[in-house]
Amino acid sequence: MATYPAAKLTIPLDIPDVDIIGTEVRRNGECYIKVESRKEITRCGICGQEIKCNYGHGQEIRLRHLPVLGYKTYICIRPKRGQCKSCMHEPTTTQTLKWYEQRSPHTTSYDGYLMKQLIGSTVEDVSMKENIGYDAVLGTLKRCVPVEVDWDSITHLGTVGIDEVALKKGHKDFAAIITARQDDGKVVILAVLEDRKKKRCAPF
Ligand SMILES: [Zn+2]
């Protein structure tokens, strides 16, 4: 009997302002999506003015992203660099893009996905299920703590949830995730509190 290649699927990537320059699916269940930024400008890290990205690329970074068809998925990018001619010593700046934070090993959407996994679960559980380090999950918690709640983006405070996240199994070390369910069914994270003392939850 003749064998046919598996049917292929094309779906849009949920990341803005990039082109896909390669994809690789490995036998070990990992998927690598290589992307390049479409943006040609960035802001000088010293003076803040817009500069052209005409100074090559930085080292490739690999960011864990939402799983595609169950594959452990990574986005790989070599960030563009620009040079400021107005500042003294003409410093270079690495372009930053809004779908990941500098020095984070995850894309912003993967962080959001982990936050949902953490509800009613422990950091250890999520670390094991997702096959990432304990510290990587803690890093997500820290990044997802909003400095200030953006009340304009919240249409409805209907159901406000307070979910405990146990930092370690069997320990009384909790974080609380405050969420609000919107009219459209979306759940937004309002705050993450490091412990669940009544005083800290009082504004909610
Ligand atoms: Zn500058």
Image (tube, helix red, strand yellow):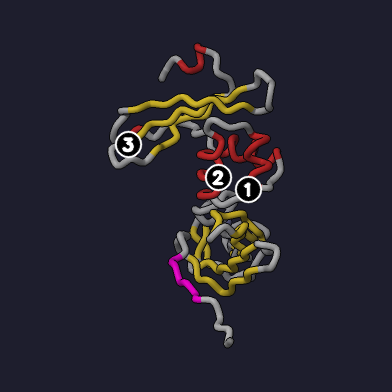
Q: Which mark is residue 104?
A: 1
User: Within 10 Å of the Cα at label 2, are there few (<14), some (14-19), or many (20+) other Cα atoms?
Assistant: many
- Residue 183, compared with residue 106, is above or below; it is above
Q: Secondary structure at mark 3?
A: loop
Question: Which one is earlier in the sequence, the residue at label 1 or at label 3?
Answer: 1
Quadrant of the displayed image that contains ligand 1: bottom right
- In reply to whether residue 9 is colored magenta, the answer given is yes
Query: Dots 3 and 2: beta carbons under 8 Å?
Result: no
Q: What residue sits right under mark 3 in the picture?
A: 182
- Residue 121, compared with residue 130, is above or below; it is above
Q: Amino acid at mark 2?
A: Asp
Tag in front: 1 or 2: 2
User: Within 10 Å of the Cα at label 3, are there few (<14), some (14-19), or many (20+) other Cα atoms?
Assistant: some
Q: Quadrant of the C terminus?
A: top left
At x 55%, y 69%, the residue is 36
Q: Nearer the viewer, residue 169 or 108?
A: 169
Q: Secondary structure at mark 2?
A: helix
Q: What residue sits right under mark 2 in the picture?
A: 111
Residue 201: percent from the left, percent from the top? 47, 17
At x 58%, y 20%, the residue is 195
Q: Amino acid at mark 1?
A: Ser
Measure the C-alpha gap from mark 1 to mark 3: 28 Å
Residue 87: percent from the left, percent from the top? 60, 57
Q: What residue span does the magenta drawing correspond to?
A: 7-12
Q: Secondary structure at mark 1?
A: loop
Q: Nearer the viewer, residue 39 or 30?
A: 30
Query: Dots 1 and 2: beta carbons under 8 Å?
Result: yes
